Image (cartoon, rainbow, N blue to C red):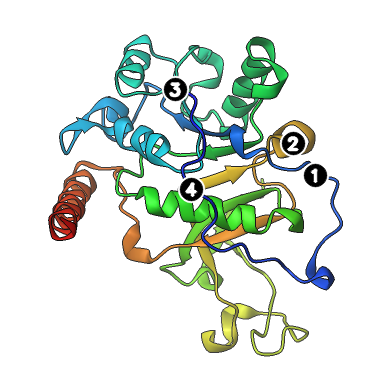
């Protein structure tokens, strides 16, 4: 993607009152250096070759790349992959893919943190200081139904809260199950103890009176428990300093970006893939109709 200037400003800049701000030493975000990174390793257990498999007429990763290219805030869109075949697909669809990710950070259990550290190190070694990323937007290929409008809205929200000292942003939806009634099995070496249920959330608070601690949330009416949100992994925004200085992707202060449950479409199985394609076709048809009306 050729370097581009912003195509539009914030629709409405809202500023938190001084009493709500956290004093922060975080640097000012350079809006000329907001970069999207699309992680696209070659291995996939659920759907073979998933990231380049055809999805509504394009390789799956192309939809994430397109969101980066069309965003009015993202100025460069990169793909991090361990596959030369995938790299060529990324280049063909307009992304920058100047390196191959090492195999040791591209396996099934490799973390986002590892590939971001690799990306930032590569940038430091190969790009001048004024082109270093100021903000990272992670766009996963597994979110093909994500719209560029949502991407821009998430970036806008982070920029609007820039002075509040947030380390990251994550898109979330309301949890579709009751997490207060979920448990681990005790990992004790004592075989008898392995059948003991351990609550995922051992204590909580009353949503109407937050100072009131609930010692056993598994045994009270859910109406008094706080709402819980699920990270749907559609949009992550991260300050590079969160990765380099805190050694993680989320940091200590993570801003929420709320999405509707029906915005999310998983593609981990063939059946989910088919359902997501149907959803995407509906989205594309609606967009075409809207364009026709506007003309």
- Whole-Å distance between the Cαs marked 3 and 1? 28 Å
Picture layout, residue 6 above or below residue 216: above
What is the quadrant of residue 89 in the picture?
top left
Give the residue pinned by disc 4.
8
The residue tagged with tag 3: helix, strand or loop? loop
The reply to whether discs 1 and 2 touch (Cβ–Cβ < 8 Å) is yes
The disc, 4 or 3, on the residue closer to the chain's N-terminal end is 3
Q: Give the Cα distance between marks 4 and 1.
A: 24 Å
Q: Does the CB distance between marks 3 and 1 fall below 8 Å?
A: no
Question: Taking 230 as reference, is 141 left or right?
Answer: left
User: Residue 288, position in %: x, y?
Assistant: 15, 51
Residue on which disc 3 sits: 2
Q: CA distance from mark 1 to mark 2?
A: 8 Å
* Secondary structure beneath label 1: loop
Q: Residue 269: give x, y in percent of width and height.
A: 25, 43
| Badge number at residue 26 | 1
Mark 2 vs mark 3, foreground winner is 3
- Comes first in the chain, label 3 or label 1: 3
- Identify the residue position indicated by label 2 in the image: 241
**Nearest to viewer (mark 1 / mark 2):** 1
What's the residue at 18%, 51% (across, down)? 275
The dot on residue 260 is none
Of callouts 4 and 1, the N-terminal one = 4
Disc 4 and disc 1 in contact, CB within 8 angstroms:
no
Residue at (61, 32) in percent of width and height: 33
Say above or below: 227 vs 87.
below
- Across and down, in percent, residue 58 comes to 21, 31
Secondary structure, mark 4, is loop
* 98 vs 289, nearest the viewer: 289
For image coordinates 63% across by 42% down, the residue present is 238
- Label located before the other in sequence (1 or 2): 1
């Amino acid at each position: 993607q050729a370097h581009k200037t912003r195509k539009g400003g914030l629709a409405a800049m809202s500023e938190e009152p001084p009493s709500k701000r956290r004093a922060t030493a975080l640097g000012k975000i350079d809006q000329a250096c907001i970069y999207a990174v699309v992680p696209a390793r070659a291995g996939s257990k659920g759907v073979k070759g998933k990231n380049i498999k055809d999805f509504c007429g394009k390789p799956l990763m192309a939809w994430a790349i397109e969101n980066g290219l069309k965003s009015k805030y993202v100025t460069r869109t990169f793909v991090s992959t361990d596959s030369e075949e995938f790299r060529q697909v990324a280049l063909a669809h307009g992304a920058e893919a100047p390196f191959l990710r090492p195999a040791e950070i591209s396996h099934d259990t490799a973390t986002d943190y590892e590939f971001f550290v690799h990306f930032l190190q590569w940038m430091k070694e190969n790009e001048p200081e004024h082109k270093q990323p100021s903000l990272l937007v992670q766009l996963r290929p597994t979110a093909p139904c994500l719209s560029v409008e949502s991407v821009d809205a998430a970036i806008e929200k982070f920029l609007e809260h820039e002075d509040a000292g947030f380390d990251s942003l994550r898109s979330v939806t309301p949890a579709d199950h009751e997490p207060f009634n979920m448990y681990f099995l005790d990992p004790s070496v004592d075989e008898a103890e392995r059948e003991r249920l351990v609550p995922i959330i051992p204590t909580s608070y009353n949503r109407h009176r937050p100072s009131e601690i609930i010692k056993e949330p598994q045994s009270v009416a859910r109406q008094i428990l706080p709402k819980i949100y699920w990270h749907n992994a559609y949009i992550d925004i991260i300050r590079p300093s969160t990765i380099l200085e805190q050694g993680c992707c989320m940091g200590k202060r993570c801003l929420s970006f709320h999405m509707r449950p029906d915005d999310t479409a998983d593609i981990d199985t063939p059946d989910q893939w088919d359902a997501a394609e149907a959803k995407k076709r509906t989205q594309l048809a609606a967009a075409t109709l809207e364009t026709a009306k506007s003309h």
